[in-house]
Amino acid sequence: MTKHLITSALPYVNGLPHLGHLVGCLLPADVYARYLRQKGEEVLFICGTDEHGTPSEVGADREGMDVVDYCKKYHDLHVQMYQGFNLSFDYFGRTSSDQNKEIVYRIFKALDQNGLITERTTKQVYSPDDERYLPDSYVMGTCPHCGYDKAKGDQCEHCTKVLDPTDLIHPKSVLSGSSNIEIRETKHLFLELPKLEKELALWIETKKGLWPDIAYSIACKWLKEGLQERGITRDLKWGFSVPKDGFNDKVFYVWFDAPIGYIGITKQWADECPESRNWETWWLNAPDVRHTEFMGKDNIPFHTISFPATLKGTGEEWTQVAFLKGMNYLNYAGGKFSKSAHRGVFLDDALTEFPADYWRYWLMANAPESDDSSFSFDLFAGTVNKDLNDVLGNFINRVLKMIGNNFGNTVPSLGPVTEEEENLYAETDRLVHLYGDAMNRLEFRKAISALRELWVLGNNYIAKTEPWKVLKTNSTYGGTILNTAMNLILLYAKLSAPVMPETAAKIQALFLTNHALDWPTGTAADYLKTIRGGEPFALTEPLFKKILPEQVTELKLKYKETE
């Protein structure tokens, strides 16, 4: 039986994430993990905060904190945010852990022994005004390839070209904005990616037609341009010190130790319960493990090139990614999220405005899969009001009220079915298959579209059969219609559970007879007969509330959507 290892890009610990971070990797990974668990698959969903590097040092300085305490503070805040959004990690760890240090050292020593680590004297940017060496991402200037004037020193986000800070035109410090910078010589260690290029290219070729276009094309683009040696050390204090003579005063580059963090965090998980867990069964010599990664497009090169090459270079049989779900960007009202300008919706604020499921549903329905998408409160309110309130919520409320008015709080019996029910069964089967197939392919917008069609199908069934009229002359068939409708409600809970877990649980609680939210098996002619006549149920308040126009206007001003 295949075991499913699911990882999301590790959110950087510096500051709090926004909606774009959530939909770019974390939420799709959670939806997929929940879906697989619902089908009875063995799943390990791993994530954690990425903690090393200059941003943590700078953030700690700004808050007058020790960097270790600073990382702990923000790690805990991340945990709170993700719990609020019901992200179902099996373990949410930290890249600064002792376990990750152990794995990083193991992998580095293997690479070094295999002749894949080389020493080079390089030129590095030093800022006298900041009194520190600047890491690549803290140098900004004009890209020499495309002319983008906000390119960072590690990669241009506009043309995706890999850069060195010294390549930039008119470079300046991101910290102070000072263009008073010096180029100093310093020794560093590099990973010999060119020596691994052929092996890596053969491996990536096997992913053609399997990986999404965005992941496969970015990997091929890097290979076509030719791989370069990749620096893996930095002149910083915060990080894992390098266990090699002559380099003990340096630390590993965050992009070296962070991806290894998936393994280190798995070891954290295993160490908490060593009698029943073994991290190596997921990561070493584990042909039964299927590894699925989720991340934004800016992280794709590191997880299709650098990290796989790092693992291959050890000579050990590490688990490699089988499927990489790359996502584009979610923009904010046509622009960008900005924490410094307090523009956009960040996760701590989002949960104070609306329940998590409102956000989860909208984000997955508008996931930036094929291209960038944009959030606005008009779009958000329109989707919540139409899909959740008018379609799903309205169907449930109507059915419960009709049964309550005619049969008390007891589900009516299923009598003989007609052509209407047979047609309903056939269309339900089609849409459930469509939904499951889209989820298997990680095509989330298609999956949500099929889910919504199922909700519409229920409304159309009620509208066509008109049980409020049928009950006046044929209570038996009227009961059949409403029994079928109650079974649809249970089906909606099951299918909505990966996307809207709180809503699914509330629907499940309506049925006083325990019905598990497992994945429906068999055909609709079977699973739409799960709820039997005579079962009690509880009435409930409406599941959703409409977002009023005046609320939308207030939210736009509050979150600087319109300036």
Image: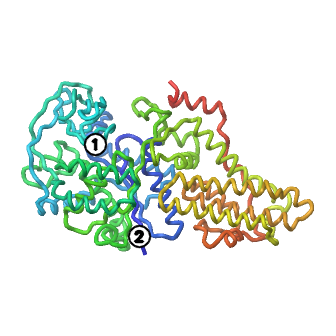
Q: In the image, 84: left or right of 238?
A: right
- Of residue 435 and residue 8, the one placed in the foreground of this image is 435
Quadrant in the rendering for residue 100: bottom left
What amino acid type should be assigned to the residue bearing mark 2? Lys
State the residue lying farthest toward the bottom. Answer: 1
Give the answer, above or below, for where 221 lies relative to 116: above
Badge 1 or badge 2: first in the primary sequence: 2
Display coloring: rainbow
Q: Is residue 46 visible?
A: no
> Pointer 1: what residue?
67
Q: Quadrant of the N terminus?
A: bottom left
> Pointer 2: what residue?
3
Q: CA distance from mark 1 to mark 2?
A: 37 Å
Q: Secondary structure at mark 2?
A: strand
Q: Secondary structure at mark 1?
A: helix
> Which residue occupies 25% across, 58% down?
201
The x, y position of residue 492, in whole percent, is 65, 59
The x, y position of residue 292, in whole percent, is 39, 60
Quadrant in the rendering for residue 45: bottom left
Give the answer, above or below, for where 148 lies relative to 259: above
